[in-house]
Image (cartoon, rainbow, N blue to C red):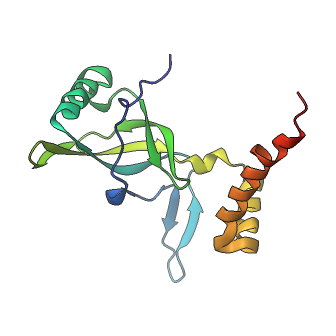
Amino acid sequence: MPNPSIPKGFKIVTSGFGTDGPGGVKRTEVGGGRPRYGLDYDRGTQRYNVSIGMTAQRYSVWTVFFHHIIKKGAITFDMEIDSGFGLQVHACNIMPGTYSAERVGGSVTLVRFAVEAESRVYDLSASEAQAYIDLWNMEGDDLIQLLSRLAIFANVDTNVLDFD
């Protein structure tokens, strides 16, 4: 059964968006020397701090979704968050003790909570990650322009060759 999705039209406030470190690294003190670092685990979830501004009507929809559909965050749900590659859908759980709702002006309510989700960076293999870094090292800040132009070439410019 697919995960429930956050209600249509609900978007996170990206200006207040933040995340904690991914964890997985251990540090061991060594008498008389530098501490040693080692990888405890490679993948795993990361904490993302989320804020959503809502009108009174949207807040009532959110309240129903929060209490009945995702059972206060115990049920995994799909929501767009930014784990490093722009807003993309992630499977999320609301972390216990992080939820708050505050009326911030008139009929606007700001709902804040932290979710656990796995970063989309793990969708890349080690060789794809290295290729991405190598491409960045060649193109720098122009990388996005290059990839955007390549997408136009692949999806638009080559349609002139379509002989259907």
Query: In this picture, is 118 found above or below 61?
Result: below
Q: Measured from the top left, where is residue 157 in percent x and y?
A: 80, 48
Above or below, 21 relative to 136: above
- State which quarter of the image contains the C terminus: top right
Measuring from the top left, give residue 7's x and y in whole percent. Answer: 35, 29
Rendered residue at 18%/28% (across/down)? 60
Asked if residue 50 lies left or right of residue 122, the reply is left
Furthest toward the left, the residue is 106
Which residue occupies 67% across, 73% down? Answer: 140
Instruction: Please say if 35 is above or below 110.
Output: below
Estimate the x, y position of residue 145 in percent, counting from the top left: 67, 64
Relative placement, left or right, of 57 versus 147 is left
Badge count: 0
Whole-percent x, y for residue 149 in the image: 72, 58
Q: Residue drawn at (46%, 42%), measured in percent from left and top?
A: 117
11 w.r.t. 70: above or below: below
Residue farthest to the bottom, as pictured: 32
On the question of residue 85 being in view, the answer is yes
Q: Between 145 and 76, which is closer to the camera in this rendering? A: 145
Q: Nearer the viewer, residue 125 or 84?
A: 84
What residue sits 37% from the left and 31% below the top? 6
Residue lying at the far top of the rendered structure: 1
Observer-nearest of 130 and 104: 104
Q: Is residue 137 left or right of residue 28?
A: right
Residue 42 appears in the picture as rendered: no
